[in-house]
């Protein structure tokens, strides 16, 4: 049975009697999976703490008003009409559902990240499940898991490849069919330059009216068919199929334009030609191979130049079976990237290097982009819209093993723009993630720092379109995350973002340590909106399942919500340090927001002074109609220290009635006969 906390706290009391938190762990809630098996149950405990705290202070009605106000704001801005700066174009049903019940949203966020990671950790059947999850979240319909025939010969593997190419091309054509010829021409000519190439600011576009028009055209496309195109490529990730391709005999040596090295076969299909490279070193000039829709390379340290998937070549698949390979290019839509097309890159073995600029490495604009790297210590480098990014489509980067390095400047590493589902999942290894360090922050010109916009962020484009879904998932290892503004499990402008690290001692730097090019930063170290944040009608969730972790930032982060938003940070184990020391950090809601930081177990350190502080004032919305601000820092277990001066094992009022700092011992940590009194405090230093 789930333990309900009976807090017995009232605003007028001077002290209360404490009790230890979580007296027992229900075995029926434990699950045999990666990460903390009690994670679903622990999120439920947070929900109970919040509900009981609100009720004990007689402000549960205020919270109900807050929820109702969020719903009314959504209702007032739905549809295509321009009723305000916030509009309803590209809005997702799941986003709408989550915004209307913020506490239930936390439960669903934990389930979503866990189930998506479990699916991607599987074989091709798991990828199939992951795409089914994405399809439902993106209003692209429901489908049941599919069955795949066993692939038992090289000939059968090639036939499966041929059919996948044709199916993907047919589905892609169906996806763009609702567009007129002139509309499709507009997208072909304007989609990349307006939504990426001309953009150096993260929160909007230079040409907002044209951007709005292009997003409306993307919304007109057949989303069901677009996901059918992604589904068509799933069989190519089957380990049995890849093993059979590796058995293709090395017979023949033909000449193919654009290829240096041995080519064993060239096979014609209705979708284009398939080129099979030999087991030695090959160099592929992919854009000189305009009639080729697939390259299968059997071995060698190969080099791939460019390789765009676009209306000119709507489908491109690359499968490299072994070797330390280099993928190099400057054009958009390469390396498992696509613009109004469908692309998949699979690299089975080797320490590989991926160098690109925009829309690459499992990224899509109005299409499907998938990159799967099975093993090796890999290096990914790009600028904008890279490494598991999507706008108007689906983008997936899945790295299964190795010590990997991800380097990007903006809109990257699990980023979902309007109508986009973008995910980066690295299953294992000590990995390094870097996002930012190039363009000066434009969102708050009065403060220093760089644009970031990555590492599990779903964001709209302000005054253009509502946001999508972005997720960064990491299965294990001691990882390092560097990020600038708007990063690490956050949502902006009617979007949803999720970051989750399932294991290891992780370091999250609030601000990239060097500039993007490796030189010294030209901007002072300063960061804003990080680690479980929501900004402007958005939701963000950051989870860490185990390990001794650190969380950095400057202001407005670590479970922070601003302007009708929800931001939550959960750490389920370890001795953790929360290092953001500026104002409005560590469980804060502001301008009608709900911010929560929940930490379970370990001796934790909270620097700064804003923990759980709720400002009594709101300028963006009218009180009491918007309900108020709601801020929670909840720590269960361990001996913890707080910069704001509150005591371990205490229950505190922080700022207005909506501000809570709750520190509880676990059962066995404190003798029940010697449980200290839990006191109500309001540290004036927290005003910011």
Image (cartoon, helix red, strand yellow):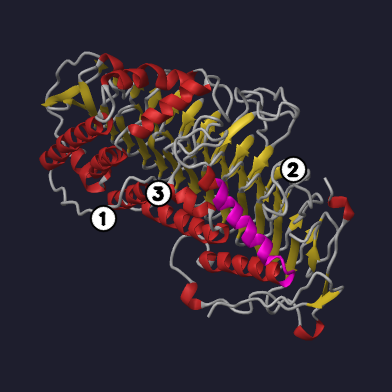
The numbered mark, 1 or 2, whose residue comes first in the sequence reads 1
- Left or right? Give the position of 476 relative to 50: left
Question: Relative to the observer, which residue lies in front, 403 or 179?
Answer: 179
Callout in the foreground (1, 3) = 3
Which stretch appears magenta?
Answer: 56-73
Q: Is residue 616 visible?
A: yes
Name the residue rendered at 44%, 50% in the picture.
94
Return the x and y of residue 9 as percentages of the image width and height. Answer: 76, 74
Return the x and y of residue 149 as percentages of the image width and height. Answer: 15, 51
Does residue 117 belong to the magenta stretch? no
Query: Which structural element holds mark 3?
Result: helix
Name the residue rendered at 69%, 63% in the picture.
634
Looking at the image, do the residues carrying marks 3 and 2 touch, with CB atoms under 8 Å apart?
no
Looking at the image, do the residues carrying marks 1 and 2 touch, with CB atoms under 8 Å apart?
no
Q: CA distance from mark 1 to mark 3?
A: 16 Å
The residue indicated by pointer 2 is: 619
Query: Which structural element holds mark 2?
Result: loop
Q: Quadrant of residue 310?
A: top left
Return the x and y of residue 173 as percentages of the image width and height. Answer: 23, 30
Query: Which structural element holds mark 1?
Result: loop
Q: In the figure, 519 relative to 499: above or below?
A: above
Q: CA distance from mark 1 to mark 2?
A: 49 Å
The residue indicated by pointer 3 is: 137
Name the residue rendered at 37%, 16% in the picture.
189
């Amino acid at each position: 049975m789930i333990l309900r906390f009976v807090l017995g706290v009232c605003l007028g009391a001077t002290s209360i009697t404490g009790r230890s938190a979580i007296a027992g762990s229900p075995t029926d809630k434990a699950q045999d999976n990666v990460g903390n098996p009690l994670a679903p149950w622990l999120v439920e405990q947070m929900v109970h703490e919040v509900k009981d705290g609100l009720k004990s202070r007689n402000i549960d009605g205020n919270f109900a008003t807050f929820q109702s106000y969020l719903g009314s704001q959504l209702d007032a801005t739905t549809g295509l009409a321009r009723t305000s700066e916030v509009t309803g174009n590209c809005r997702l049903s799941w986003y709408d559902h989550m915004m209307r019940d913020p506490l239930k949203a936390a439960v669903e966020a934990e389930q979503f990240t866990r189930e998506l990671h479990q699916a991607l950790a599987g074989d091709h059947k798991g990828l199939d499940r992951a795409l089914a999850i994405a399809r439902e979240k993106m209003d692209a319909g429901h489908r049941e898991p599919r069955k795949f025939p066993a692939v038992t010969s090289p000939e059968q593997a090639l036939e499966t490849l041929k059919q996948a190419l044709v199916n993907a091309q047919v589905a892609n054509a169906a996806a763009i069919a609702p567009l007129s010829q002139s509309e499709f021409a507009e997208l072909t000519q304007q989609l990349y330059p307006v939504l990426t190439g001309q953009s150096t600011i993260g929160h909007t576009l230079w040409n907002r009216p044209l951007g709005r028009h292009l997003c409306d055209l993307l919304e007109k496309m057949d989303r069901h068919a677009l996901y059918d195109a992604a589904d068509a490529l799933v069989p190519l990730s089957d380990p049995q199929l890849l093993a059979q391709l590796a058995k293709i005999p090395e017979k023949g040596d033909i000449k193919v334009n654009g290829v240096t090295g041995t080519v064993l076969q060239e096979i014609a299909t209705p979708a284009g030609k398939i080129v099979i490279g030999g087991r030695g070193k090959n160099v592929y000039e992919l854009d000189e191979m305009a009639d080729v829709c697939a390259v299968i390379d059997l071995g060698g340290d190969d080099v791939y130049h460019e390789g765009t998937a676009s209306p000119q070549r709507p489908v491109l698949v690359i499968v490299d079976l072994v070797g330390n390979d280099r993928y190099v290019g400057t054009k958009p839509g390469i390396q498992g990237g696509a613009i109004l097309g469908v692309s998949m890159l699979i690299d089975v073995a080797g320490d590989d290097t991926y160098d690109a600029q925009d829309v690459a490495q499992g990224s899509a604009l109005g299409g499907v982009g998938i990159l799967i790297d099975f093993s090796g210590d890999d290096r990914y480098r790009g600028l904008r819209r890279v490494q598991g990014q999507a706008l108007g489509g689906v983008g997936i980067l899945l790295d299964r093993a190795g010590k990997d390095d991800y380097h990007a400047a903006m809109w990257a590493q699990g980023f979902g723009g309007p109508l986009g589902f973008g995910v980066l999942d690295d299953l294992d290894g000590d990995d390094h993630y870097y996002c930012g360090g190039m363009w000066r922050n434009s969102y708050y010109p009065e403060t220093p720092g760089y644009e970031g916009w990555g590492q599990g962020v779903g964001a709209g484009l302000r005054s253009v379109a509502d946001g999508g879904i972005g997720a960064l998932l990491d299965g294990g290892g001691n990882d390092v995350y560097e990020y600038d503004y708007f990063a690490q499990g956050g949502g902006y402008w009617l979007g949803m973002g999720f970051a989750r690290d399932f294991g290891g001692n992780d370091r999250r730097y609030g601000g990239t340590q060097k500039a993007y090019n490796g030189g010294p930063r030209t901007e002072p170290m300063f960061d804003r909106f990080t680690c479980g944040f929501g900004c402007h009608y958005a939701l963000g969730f950051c989870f860490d399942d185990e390990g001794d972790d650190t969380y950095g930032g400057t202001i407005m982060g670590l479970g922070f919500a601003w302007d009708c938003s929800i931001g939550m940070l959960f750490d389920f184990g370890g001795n953790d340090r929360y290092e953001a020391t500026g104002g409005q950090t560590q469980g804060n809601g502001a301008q009608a927001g709900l911010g929560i930081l929940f930490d379970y177990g370990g001796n934790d350190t909270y620097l700064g002074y804003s923990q759980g502080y709720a400002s009594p004032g709101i300028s963006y919305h009218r009180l009491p109609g918007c309900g108020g601000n709601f801020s929670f820092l909840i720590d269960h277990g361990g001996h913890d220290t707080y910069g704001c001066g509150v005591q371990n094992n205490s229950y505190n009022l922080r700022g207005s009635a909506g501000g809570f700092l709750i520190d509880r011992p676990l059962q066995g940590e404190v003798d029940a006969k010697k449980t200290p009194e839990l006191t109500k405090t309001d540290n004036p230093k927290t005003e910011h």
